[in-house]
Image (cartoon, rainbow, N blue to C red):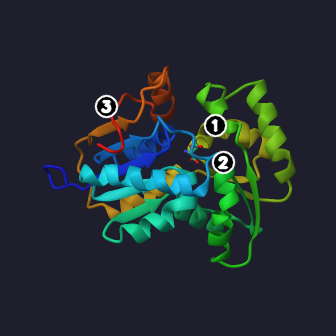
Amino acid sequence: MTETGNPVIGVFDSGLGGLTVVRELRRQIPSSSIIYLGDTARVPYGTKSESTIRRFAVEDTEFLLRRGVDLLVIACHTVSSVASDYLKALHPELKILSVLEPSVEAAVSVTKDRKIGIIGTTATVRSGKHRSEILKHGDFDVVEKPCPLFVPLVEEGLIDGTIPELVAKMYLEGLKGRIDTLVLACTHYPLLKPIIRRVMGENVALVDPSEEVAKKVAQLLPTPGDKKGQLQVYLTDIPPGYLGLIERFLGEPPDSIVKVSVFE
Ligand code: DGL
């Protein structure tokens, strides 16, 4: 809890991309106090095995617990898909929200034809978790497509122009006509929304999980005050060009950035 009795929200991601979730939390709930852990020393998670992703997720969670967070938001879709059930079983005392459930709920309520597309990292798609969660809501056609090149494109700042458009076409052309709703199930993909929209056309609804999870968090918090909350960022590495990336994902400078080890 903060001095004023507000809950502290812990948010973690494999790297800096999860700051898209923090950006949305701060837009929807400006008074929220947030501690963010970005595991920049071990990013990407989306190309790793399930057991490694689970181990990293446990270490990240325990780091934030030691800093006294009251609520945990898993901003990383790879962790949400592969390890969130495991984390919830390991920490029944902690309220854990992942980006997965709110985006599935949004997708099933938005789709008109019951045809939903999921794009994410290789590990996210391989887990089949979105499909199984969607099917809990009834009969739906689910089309999943890993888009691994989207992450390095966004990190290189290639979010508009010929190259990202070609890559988006390569991944997404095959989904056209088969879905009416597309879930952007990766922290980086909201930055490619204009290109994804251009390739998919206006008739496909895009679900941005950062917006959906922030709505869920807002429902859980006491009435927000008007004082802007603190944002502390912990990173396991300070990579070259990190300030530019933070600016791209978060849109503002955080109150503090500290380099840490998850074992501290
Ligand atoms: N944060 C990851 C996700 O949302 C993308 C980057 C990675 O592969 O670690 O799935």
Q: Which residue is mark 2?
A: 121
Q: Residue at x 62, y 25 (%)?
A: 156
In the image, the residue with mark 1 has its CB under 8 Å from the nearest atom of ligand 1: yes
* Type of amino acid at the residue the image marks with label 3: Val
In this picture, is 190 found above or below 84? above
Asked whether the beta carbons under mark 2 and mark 1 sit within 8 Å of each other, the answer is yes
Residue 95 at what x, y percent from top left? 35, 65
Report the Cα–Cα distance between label 2 and label 1.
Answer: 8 Å
Q: Residue at x 29, y 31 (%)?
A: 256
| First along the sequence among labels 1 and 3 | 1
In the image, the residue with mark 2 has its CB under 8 Å from the nearest atom of ligand 1: yes
Which of the image's four quarters has the N terminus?
Answer: bottom left
Q: Residues within 10 Å of mark 3 (few under 14, many from 20)?
A: few
Give the secondary structure at mark 1: helix
Name which quarter of the figure residue 24 lies in: top left
In this picture, is 107 found above or below 31? below
Task: Return the mark for residue 258.
Answer: 3
Can residue 214 be seen in the rendering of this structure? no
Q: Residue at x 69, y 27 (%)?
A: 160
* Type of amino acid at the residue the image marks with label 2: Thr
Q: Which residue is mark 1?
A: 151
Report the Cα–Cα distance between label 1 and label 3.
Answer: 24 Å
Report the Cα–Cα distance between label 3 and label 2.
Answer: 27 Å
Residue 249 in the figure: left or right of residue 186: left
Give the secondary structure at mark 2: loop
Residue 65 at what x, y percent from top left? 29, 55
Give the secondary structure at mark 3: strand
